[in-house]
Image (cartoon, rainbow, N blue to C red):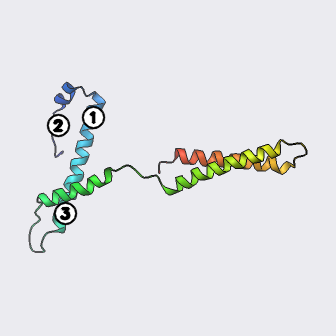
Amino acid sequence: MSLVQIDKQKLIDTGFTESGVKRYENTITEYSQILFDKSKKFGEARKANDSAVEINYENVQGAVKVISSTFADEKIPKWKLWAQSGEYLITALCGYLGSQATQDNAPSHFTIFFVISAVVGVGLFIVRKTSKN
């Protein structure tokens, strides 16, 4: 049972597509449930031991502040910054090793290190770009 009733026809008349209406409805329903739960928790936390729970304006407003504080832009995890820095350093290393490996009389270990560093660099890039967090 939903706490909120949504006028779907009004959304459609406004220009919402079927998927837009569904997403809007899901978002409002989820938000109202979260707001309800957090408001209830605020009310329970502030009640006296011998009284019933009362959820007042301050409880709802506190819940709104807690919920809205999570709307900020997601911060980039530190490991991703370090991984990207590592990619840059490995790219420079690949350039150096590649130039050394193509010289006349170059030892074979330059080629081996070049391939290893290229694989590590590409691996870091793939992990960083495909990671959700």
Instruction: Determine the secondary structure under disc 2.
Output: loop
Q: Are marks 1 and 2 in contact (CB under 8 Å)?
A: no
Q: Give how far across and how far down residue 74 sits, in percent.
A: 40, 50
For marks 3 and 1, the one nearer the N-term is 1
Question: Quick one: 120 or 23, which is closer to the camera?
Answer: 120
**For the residue labelled by badge 1, is the local secondary structure a helix, a strand or a loop?**
helix
Residue drawn at 19 percent across, 31 percent down:
8
Compared with 14, 33 (above or below) is: below
Separation of residues labelled 3 and 1 (CA atoms)? 30 Å
What amino acid type is highlighted by mark number 2?
A: Ile
Q: Which kind of residue does numbered mark 3 sit on? A: Phe
Identify which residue is drawn at 62% across, 53% down: 86
Q: What mark, if any, has residue 22 been given in the picture? A: 1
The x and y percentages for residue 32 are 21, 48
Q: What residue appears at the point 16 percent right and 46 percent down from the top-left corner?
A: 3
Report how far apart the C-alphas of labels 3 and 2 lie in the structure. Answer: 26 Å
Crowding near the residue tagged with mark 1, few <14, some 14–19, many ≥20 C-alpha atoms within 10 Å: few
Binning the other alpha carbons within 10 Å of mark 2 as few (below 14), some (14 to 19) or many (20 upward) gives: some
Image quarter of the N terminus: top left
Front: mark 3 or 1 = 3
Residue at point 63% right, 48% down? 88
Q: How many marks?
A: 3
Q: Which residue is mark 3?
A: 42
Residue tagged 2: 6
* Mark 3 in CB contact with mark 1 (< 8 angstroms): no
